[in-house]
């Protein structure tokens, strides 16, 4: 894996993202990344979050 000078993976090598929060903004980011072929993991402390994401 290629790294940037800061130690992060090169942008074209990123295949998965995590969304911290599954409210309106978090769900929107999850949809954005899913539509572009990324694997997405989302986390939210709300018990209803999973149902909202599906």
Image: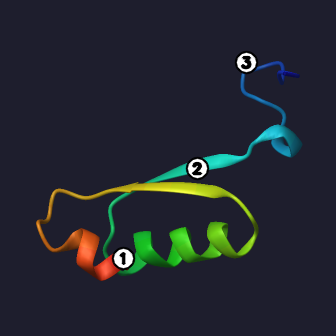
Q: Earlier in the sequence, mark 1 or mark 3?
A: 3
Residue in the image at 29% along x and 81% along y: 52
Alpha carbon distance from label 3 to label 2: 17 Å
Q: Secondary structure at mark 3?
A: loop
Label 3: few (<14), some (14–19) or many (≥20) C-alpha neighbours in 10 Å: few
* Dot in front, 1 or 3: 1
The residue to which callout 1 is attached is 53
Q: Nearer the viewer, residue 54 or 9?
A: 54
Secondary structure found at label 2 = strand
Q: Is residue 42 above or below residue 54?
A: above
Q: How is the image coloured?
A: rainbow
**Mark linked to residue 7:** 3
CB-based contact (under 8 Å), mark 1 and mark 3? no
Asked where in the image residue 5 lies, by quadrant, the reply is top right
Residue 35 image offset from top left, x and y in percent: 70, 76
| Among numbered discs 1 and 2, the one appearing first in the sequence | 2
Between 10 and 16, the one nearer to me in the picture:
16
């Amino acid at each position: 894996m290629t790294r940037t000078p800061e130690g992060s993976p090169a942008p074209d090598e990123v295949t998965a993202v995590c969304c911290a929060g599954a409210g309106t903004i978090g769900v929107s980011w999850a949809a954005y990344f899913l539509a572009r072929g990324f694997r997405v993991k989302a986390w939210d402390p709300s018990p209803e979050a999973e149902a909202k994401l599906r």
